[in-house]
Image: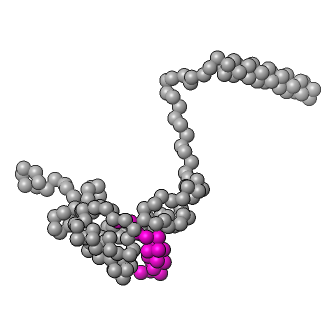
Amino acid sequence: MAKDGTNRGGSRPGSGRKKKTPEGTYEHALFTAEQLKELTDSPHVAYVSSKTVSYTKAFKTAAWQRYCDGIDPVQIFSDAGLNVDTLGKTRILGFFKLLREAKAKGVPFTEGNDPYPSDAEQTYSFPTPPRRANRGRPPVMSDSEINKLATKVAYMSQELEFLKKIILAEKKEK
């Protein structure tokens, strides 16, 4: 709040800041030791850190199938025996966003947070954007490259003159 008591912004939709939960903490807070133990014991979890959770390939496949059947993401996690309150809705929805992106790219699900197979990356890689020209600086070329270009320009100039003569000759005949 400002000195005059008015609210001058803060955590509001679209501000780019994380929202606060009713307890006053930010979303994606660190897991407690009890929550880490609970997540580690789950057969659906491949890896857990203080901030992130990675799931098994089997769980990803089953969750995707149920999601495609129209079941709510939170319900899928709840039915799998995972504590929805521990994970939070943001993490659950983010998990399904990653699954949608993987399916859109046509890559298979992986175990935990393993990277996608390298052949899939090559198949679905985006083209690299063209490099911007060096502004104000001439391109660096060797003497032999400059000589080759000069020879090419001279040859093309001769070709152009020859074509002009042919065109003029055809016009005179008509």
Residue stretch in magenta: 53-73
Q: Is 76 above or below relative to 102?
A: below
In the image, residue 28 lies in the stretch drawn in magenta: no
Picture coordinates of residue 152, whole percent (x, y)? 74, 23
**Residue at (22, 67) in percent of width and height:** 33
Picture coordinates of residue 63, whole percent (x, y)? 44, 76
Q: Is 172 above or below relative to 30?
A: above
Name the image quarter holding residue 28: bottom left
Left or right of 106, for residue 155: right
Picture coordinates of residue 90, whole percent (x, y)? 32, 67
Name the main secondary structure of what is drawn in magenta: helix
Instruction: Please say whether residue 73 is visible from this viewpoint.
Output: no
Picture coordinates of residue 10, whole percent (x, y)? 19, 55
Q: Nearer the viewer, residue 106 or 48?
A: 48
In the image, residue 60 lies in the stretch drawn in magenta: yes
Residue lying furthest left = 4
